[in-house]
């Protein structure tokens, strides 16, 4: 795998390969898939640790069963959200090869975090119904909000790794801080994948994140592609080969790329680190069921709204993707904040018994005055 090279005088040039290992028959192991897998493994380990401390309603011996539902909820919900909200054309896309339907082609990427959350909530409802034991009894029955509280405590490592994988893939690009050919801050990044929007010599897709190039820069890009293109090979196909091997063409590519905010890393820190600190601080003491879930939605939504100001909206929506200056992701996140605030009000108003924190058991609630 190549790496990111940098100097103190200019932006980093992104040459990370999204593929970790290439196996036989064209099978590959991608960092994005690995991030999900490792995130689920960490979540399972954390759920077992919480169960042993009495801070999770999921019995330790049933964590793997619960993870089956959580994995399914994440993938199915995330894919459904992506297809319905961001790429509905996949519903009518049929292909001659497996899986034959565009909506099922998860291996090509495309999971929406907001859809994944809906899937997780449904999975938590199912987990709360408990698990059948050999003696006919059911273990692990719990209110859905108790289950969502536990899941909210273990979700952040996976979110962090997913955002890092977005960065490795060179996707979900940040806003431009320096135009192509201009000096840029050392912390910014030049992503070769931004050239995906150029589909022919001098022709840029209107709904794309490819920046405008000067006539000289367009000519330089055309010369680069023509130097690589095989006879009868489409221009865009040759460009794709260059983008897939950026280290080989760095000298020619750098003057043609804008420098951008590494918004993927901003979101990794916000959604994976800051959110974890906030949630675990709240969860350390006894509190009412649902309190963690409510604050998770509020804080995640607020952080997502903030970090999206440095991230480009989805190109396929064009100007329609920024209603009143906010992207579709920000509007969905605003809905999360509203949902969390409403849930918080319900949790505080209805009272009820407190559940134990990971640092202090439920019996200490009266002395601490925890909510």
Image: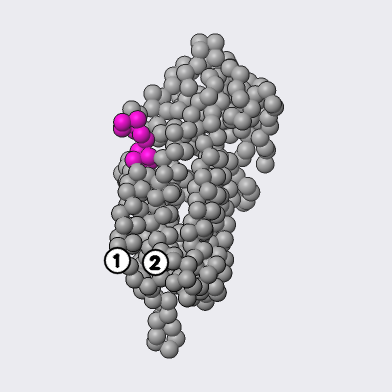
Return the mark for residue 288.
Answer: 2
In the image, residue 332 above or below residue 195? below
Q: Is residue 326 magenta?
A: yes
Q: Residue at x 58, y 34 (%)?
A: 244
In the image, residue 12 above or below residue 348? above
- CB atoms of marks 1 and 2 within 8 Å: yes
Return the mark for residue 350.
Answer: 1
Q: Residue at x 55, y 34 (%)?
A: 262
In three-dimensional space, the C-alpha distance between marks 1 and 2, rounded to whole angstroms, equals 9 Å
Residue density around tag 1, few if under 14, some if 14–19, many if 20 or more, within 10 Å: few
Q: Residue at x 54, y 73 (%)?
A: 53
Q: Residue at x 54, y 21 (%)?
A: 178
In the image, residue 317 above or below residue 360? above
Q: Point out the stretch of residues depicted in magenta.
A: 320-331
Q: Earlier in the sequence, mark 1 or mark 2?
A: 2
User: 302 or 103: which is nearer to us?
Assistant: 302
């Amino acid at each position: 795998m190549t790496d990111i090279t940098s100097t103190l005088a200019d932006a980093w040039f992104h040459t990370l390969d999204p593929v970790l290992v290439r196996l036989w028959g064209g099978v590959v192991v991608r960092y994005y898939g690995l991030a999900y897998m490792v995130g689920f493994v960490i979540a399972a380990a954390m759920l077992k640790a919480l169960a042993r401390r009495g801070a999770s309603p999921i019995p330790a011996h049933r964590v793997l069963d619960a993870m089956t539902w959580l994995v399914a909820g994440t993938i199915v919900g995330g894919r459904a959200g992506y297809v319905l909200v961001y790429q509905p054309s996949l519903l009518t896309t049929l292909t001659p090869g497996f899986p034959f339907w565009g909506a099922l082609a998860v291996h090509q990427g495309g999971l929406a975090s907001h859809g994944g959350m809906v899937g997780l909530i449904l999975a938590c409802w199912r987990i709360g119904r408990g698990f059948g034991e050999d003696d006919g009894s059911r273990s692990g029955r719990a209110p859905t909000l108790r289950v969502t509280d536990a899941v909210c405590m273990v979700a952040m490592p996976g979110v962090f790794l997913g955002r890092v994988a977005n960065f490795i893939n060179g996707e979900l690009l940040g806003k431009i801080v320096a135009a192509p050919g201009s000096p840029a801050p050392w912390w910014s990044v030049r992503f070769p994948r931004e050239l995906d929007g150029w589909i022919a010599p001098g022709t840029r897709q209107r709904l794309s994140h490819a920046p405008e190039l000067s006539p000289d820069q367009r000519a330089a890009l055309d010369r680069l592609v023509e130097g690589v293109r095989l006879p009868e090979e489409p221009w865009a196909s040759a460009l794709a080969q260059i983008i897939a091997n950026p280290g080989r063409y760095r000298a020619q590519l750098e003057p043609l790329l804008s420098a951008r905010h590494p918004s993927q890393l901003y979101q990794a820190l916000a959604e994976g680190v800051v959110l974890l600190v906030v949630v675990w601080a709240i969860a350390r003491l006894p509190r009412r069921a649902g309190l963690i879930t409510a604050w998770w939605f509020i804080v995640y939504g607020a952080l997502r709204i903030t970090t999206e100001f440095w991230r480009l909206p989805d190109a396929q929506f064009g100007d329609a993707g920024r209603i009143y200056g906010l992207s579709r992701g920000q509007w969905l996140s605003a809905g999360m904040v509203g949902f969390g605030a409403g849930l918080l009000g319900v949790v505080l108003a209805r009272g009820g018994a407190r559940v134990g924190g990971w640092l202090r058991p439920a019996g200490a609630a009266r002395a601490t005055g925890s909510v």
